[in-house]
Image (spheres, rainbow, N blue to C red):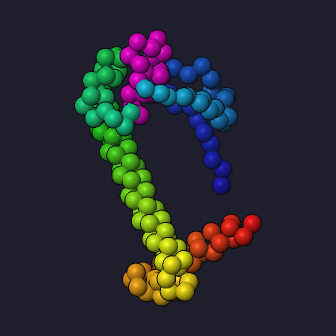
């Protein structure tokens, strides 16, 4: 199977010719806070699009101020906003899960040190930690103990 890359420019003019379409070109753009006074229009547009703080309606308004016809972009911008919110929510959920795991691990370690003669399985029984999660905590305890031994 052979794949081809061909140049199709729907929005902007590209200086690369059709013969260069099979060569990948990468541009690294470092985004920061949106700067309305920036002379770099591309950066302003990208900073607007990728901002996680702006609602879709405000992004569309700012893009129109940059001279971009937003009628055809409305659903895509809205989708991008929803996607960034989803990514943020997923990150928050993951952080909360890691925080809970860390809290349980710290509780296990404290109880191991002061009670139950170091019997981690009794501690996890007492804490009602599901059997499916126990291997994770045993592994983490082992890693911590190995670090302390070094």
Residue at (66%, 29%) from the top-left corner? Answer: 20
Q: Position of residue 58 (x, y in %)?
A: 27, 28
Residue at (50%, 86%) from the top-left corner? Answer: 116
Q: Is residue 49 highlighted in magenta?
A: yes
Residue 116 in the figure: left or right of residue 141 = left
Residue at (69%, 71%) from the top-left corner? Answer: 146
Tell me where residue 81 sits by quadrant: top left
Q: Position of residue 85 (x, y in %)?
A: 34, 46
Q: Is residue 20 highlighted in magenta?
A: no
Q: Position of residue 35 (x, y in %)?
A: 41, 19
Of the pair 79 and 105, the residue shown nearer to us? 105
Q: Report the label total.
A: 0
Residue at (39%, 59%) from the top-left corner? Answer: 96
User: Which range is magenta?
Assistant: 34-50
Tell me where residue 145 sits by quadrant: bottom right
Q: Locate the N terminus and report the quarter of the image it occupies.
A: bottom right
Residue 71 in the figure: left or right of residue 35 = left
Of the pair 19 and 109, the residue shown nearer to us? 109
């Amino acid at each position: 199977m052979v794949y081809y890359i061909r140049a199709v420019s729907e929005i902007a003019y590209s200086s690369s010719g059709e013969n260069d379409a099979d060569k990948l070109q990468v541009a690294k753009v470092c985004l920061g806070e949106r700067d309305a006074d920036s002379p770099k229009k591309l950066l302003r547009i990208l900073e607007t699009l990728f901002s996680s703080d702006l609602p879709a309606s405000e992004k569309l308004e700012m893009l129109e101020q940059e001279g971009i016809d937003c009628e055809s972009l409305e659903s895509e911008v809205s989708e991008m906003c929803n996607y960034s919110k989803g990514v943020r929510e997923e990150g928050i959920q993951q952080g909360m899960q890691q925080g809970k795991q860390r809290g349980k691990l710290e509780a296990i370690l404290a109880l191991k040190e002061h009670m139950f003669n170091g019997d981690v399985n009794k501690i996890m029984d007492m804490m009602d930690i599901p059997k499916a999660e126990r291997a994770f905590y045993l592994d983490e305890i082992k890693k911590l103990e190995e670090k302390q031994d070094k």
